[in-house]
Image (spheres, helix red, strand yellow):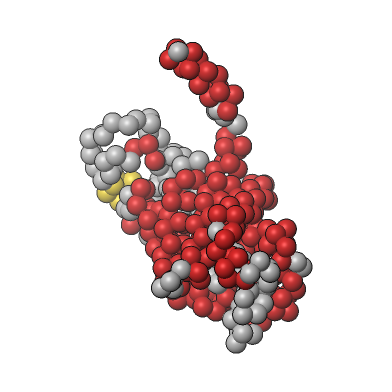
């Protein structure tokens, strides 16, 4: 019986396993990562609204933790962008081929749609408690804002747009910071820092418009709300607000990435760095285009040079620490 089960498992695994189609794996990683982010984030919003003692702070922390694990899910395969704005910014910086932007964005929107759907059905009874089964976009019993984003009543169009630009610029610029090899941050710690960035943005700009800072995070759940019975008002509400989390995030991501480059990343071309490999992270060191953990955030591209990659053989064994000198033109793992 055990032998039969083993054969059956091997056959199923051989059917599902993808080895030679790297791009397909990247799209799947972006999809599942964004799915998990929205599942946790939307569920946290609902929980904060319906639970006794629920508050926005707990939701902000949950969004950060969800983002952390979402990046862990996708980073070793696709880079864990989970955000079309980040993908575009990294493409402009030369870390992602431009032709991958649209497929990545589609995968991210699909993942966001599915994450919102699972959160919706998983908290269906909670939603009934909040709105009595009448799905509303605006008003005292509105629940659409638990899935997608809308501005606070006091926000203007330009104020909302600036809110999204600043919030996404913070995210994008700090992503460049935590992945810059000069800071010698262990690759396995980067998702934790990414999650803390998300929580920080949520706690400082979340009250204005729900801290979308991600076109997929906003548009995917918005389309789901349309399918779930909220109607076209999810797009027309607040003077057709839906375009602001898209345009504002795209502008902000590029601005944030270049602010980091101009003030920090474009300097110190001839520096030498002592790299102390972190024990246990050998498997996480990948040489993948556009990767968030370990992408080539150096000046080599600015000088028109392509740094020779340093590759490591995947191993689950703890390797011995050795101190290696590299220059800023050779920071890719």
- 24 relative to 54, above or below: above
Q: Is residue 1 visible?
A: yes
Give the quarter of the image for residue 123: bottom right
**Quadrant the N terminus occupies:** top left
Q: Position of residue 301 (x, y in %)?
A: 51, 51
Q: Residue at x 26, y 34 (%)?
A: 318
Q: Residue at x 49, y 76 (%)?
A: 205
Quick check: 226 left or right of 194?
A: right
Quick check: 328 left or right of 10?
A: left
Q: Foreground residue, 68 or 293?
A: 68
Quick check: 55 left or right of 222?
A: left
**Quadrant the C terminus occupies:** top left
Q: Is residue 83 visible?
A: no
Q: Position of residue 73 (x, y in %)?
A: 47, 45
Q: Residue at x 38, y 59 (%)?
A: 193
- 138 relative to 179, above or below: below
Count of residue discs: 0
Q: Position of residue 202 (x, y in %)?
A: 47, 70
Q: Foreground residue, 221 or 120?
A: 120
Q: Position of residue 8 (x, y in %)?
A: 53, 18
Give the quarter of the image for residue 313: top left
Q: Foreground residue, 1 or 96?
A: 1
Quick check: 84 left or right of 303?
A: right
Q: Residue at x 51, y 78 (%)?
A: 207
């Amino acid at each position: 019986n055990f032998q039969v089960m083993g054969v059956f498992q091997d056959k199923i695994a051989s059917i599902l396993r993808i080895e030679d189609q790297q791009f397909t794996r990247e799209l799947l990683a972006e999809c599942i990562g964004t799915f998990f982010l929205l599942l946790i984030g939307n569920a946290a919003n609902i929980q904060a609204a319906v639970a006794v003692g629920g508050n926005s702070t707990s939701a902000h922390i949950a969004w950060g933790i969800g983002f952390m694990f979402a990046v862990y899910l996708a980073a070793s395969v696709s880079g864990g962008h989970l955000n079309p704005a980040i993908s575009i910014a990294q493409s402009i910086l030369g870390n992602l081929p431009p032709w991958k932007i649209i497929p990545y964005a589609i995968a991210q929107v699909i993942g966001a749609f599915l994450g919102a759907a699972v959160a919706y059905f998983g908290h269906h009874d909670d939603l009934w408690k909040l709105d009595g089964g009448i799905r509303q976009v605006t008003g005292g019993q509105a629940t659409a804002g638990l899935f997608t984003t809308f501005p606070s009543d006091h926000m203007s169009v330009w104020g909302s747009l600036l809110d999204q630009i600043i919030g996404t610029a913070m995210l994008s610029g700090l992503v460049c910071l935590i992945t810059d090899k000069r800071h010698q941050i262990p690759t396995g710690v980067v998702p934790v820092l990414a999650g803390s960035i998300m929580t920080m943005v949520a706690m400082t700009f979340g009250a204005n418009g729900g801290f979308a800072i991600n076109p997929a995070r906003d548009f995917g759940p918005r389309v789901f709300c349309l399918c779930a019975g909220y109607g076209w008002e999810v797009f027309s509400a607040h003077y057709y607000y839906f375009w602001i989390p898209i345009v504002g995030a795209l502008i902000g991501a590029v601005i944030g990435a270049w602010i980091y480059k101009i003030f920090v990343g474009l300097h110190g071309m001839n520096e030498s760095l002592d790299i102390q490999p972190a024990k246990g992270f050998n498997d996480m060191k990948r040489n993948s285009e556009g990767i968030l953990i370990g992408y080539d955030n150096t000046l080599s591209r600015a000088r028109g040079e392509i740094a020779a990659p340093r590759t490591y053989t995947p191993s689950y064994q703890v390797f011995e620490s050795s101190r290696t000198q590299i220059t800023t033109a050779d920071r890719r793992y």
